Amino acid sequence: MHISEGILSAPVLGVGAGLTAAGCAVGLKKMDYKDIPKVAVLSSGFFVASLIHVPLGPTSVHLILNGLVGLLLGWAVFPAILIALFLQAILFQFGGITTLGVNTFNMALPGLVAFYLFSKATRGKNHFKAIVAAFLAGVTGVLFTGIFVAISLVFTGKPFLFLAKTVIFAHVPVMIIEGIVTSFIVVFLRKVKPELLL
């Protein structure tokens, strides 16, 4: 759900950049030195997953995996997603440099929300609750990203109102797929590397 260059208004870009800078500052402060490899691997996974775009009407859809990244990283989701989006912008022209702050915030904050809502359940002893929580984390990541993208477009101007609605509805299938993928990964991690679940 990258927003391209030249679409958003200057105030929206400024607010997005400021919020992302604050999120990255907190994320870097909370990130332990030993967590750097985990952050790098998840940033790479996010980078690859969101490169595969499927055109759908006036927008395109792709896996985001921000719910999963948020579950596994907590506040470090901000720098992880920032680095991935920066590389996508300079290497493949997805999104852009001026929209980097807004795009990062729109994807990282939902990941952080998923962390606070569902990380405890994914670590708990109840296996069924962990699966449901992981599914909901995947859904939440995409849903809130769609809502934040829509808000960014609406605050830029009324001409984007239809596109804002389309972005959310176009990603309903992605929410379900992302929930399933997140569930499978969390189940796998619970068996082989439970310490990765914060």
Image: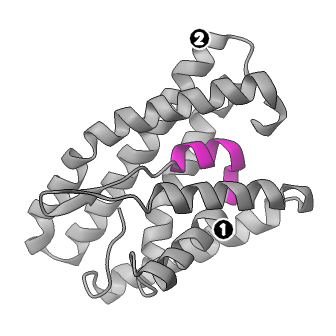
At 73% across and 19% down in the image, what residue appears? 124
Q: Name the residue tied to disc 2.
A: 128
- The region drawn magenta spans 66-76
At 41% across and 83% down in the image, what residue appears? 96
Direction from residue 164 to residue 187 in the image, left or right: right
Q: Is 137 one of the magenta-colored residues?
A: no
Q: How crowded is mark 2: few (under 14 residues within 10 Å), some or many (20 or more)?
A: few
Q: Name the residue tied to disc 1.
A: 79
Q: Is 69 one of the magenta-colored residues?
A: yes
Amino acid at the residue labelled 1: Pro
Q: Secondary structure beneath disc 1? A: helix
Quadrant of the image occupied by residue 191: top right
- From this viewpoint, is residue 91 visible? yes
The percent position of residue 107, horizontal first and vertical second, equals 47, 59
- Mark closer to the chain start, 2 or 1: 1
The percent position of residue 34, horizontal first and vertical second, equals 91, 56
Residue 64 in the image: above or below residue 128? below
Structure colour scheme: one colour
